[in-house]
Image (cartoon, rainbow, N blue to C red):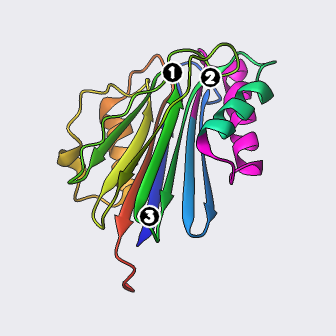
Amino acid sequence: MTVAIGTACCIAAGEEIAGDEAVVVRQPPWVLIGLADGLGHGPHAAQAASAFCRYVEEHASMPLEELLLGAGEHIASTRGAAAALLRIDESAGELEFSGVGNIAMKAISRTAMPIFCSAGILGRRVRRLRSFRFPMSPGDVVLLHSDGVASGFDLAAFRDLDPEQMARKIVETHKKSFDDATCVVAMLRDRTPA
Ligand SMILES: [Mn+2]
């Protein structure tokens, strides 16, 4: 299987820089996807989210919970952030998730994926971290979005779009204007050539 990824972000009204940031690290056989929402919005939020993403890029092969904890220490001098990580193993067909604060995950899959983020703010105080693992199959879609996207939407309504279009459409149609809105979509495909 291969993972196709699409990302979209809409900056909060009145700001010039996004306080959300997404990161994607491909290190076969897996892909690591991170999303951080710096507390509030604007430059200080951006600083926290960016510090999280740089740390994740440099320590991508660590186990998810350790990676989150390490990132939390790394961004302790910033405002802090809500943040989540998804690792998808393309050869094993498996997904692992761990997160802190208000990042949402949605999926289209035959497997139910009951996940939750730990309470707290990464970089400040975090309750006990947890990670969750689920099997995945071709055709599955998993996404992360920040709380600037209203979470009540039905992902199935977007399923015919490619990942880039899907991320863009979800942000366009469900963003809240007063916060940064970011969506990262991962779609599993068969490894057959297009
Ligand atoms: Mn937010």
Any atom of ligand 1 within 8 Å of the CB at mark 1?
A: no
Q: Is residue 88 left or right of residue 115?
A: right
Q: Which residue is mark 2?
A: 81
Q: Is 98 covered by the magenta stretch?
A: no
Residue 2 on image: x %, y % = 44, 71
Q: Which residue is mark 3?
A: 4
**Cα distance, mark 2 to mark 1?**
8 Å
Residue 165 seen: yes
Between marks 2 and 1 in the image, the one whose residue lies nearer the viewer: 1
**Cα distance, mark 3 to mark 2?**
26 Å
Any atom of ligand 1 within 8 Å of the CB at mark 2?
A: no
| Quarter residue 51 falls in | top right
Q: Earlier in the sequence, mark 3 or mark 1?
A: 3
Residue 41 on image: x %, y % = 60, 18
Element type where label 1 sits in the image: loop
Position of 136 relative to 1 (above/below): above
User: Which residue is painted at 57% across and 53% down in the image?
Assistant: 32
Q: Nearer the viewer, residue 79 or 71?
A: 71
> Pointer 1: residues within 10 angstroms few (<14), some, or many (20+)?
many
- The residue type indicated by label 3 comes to Ala
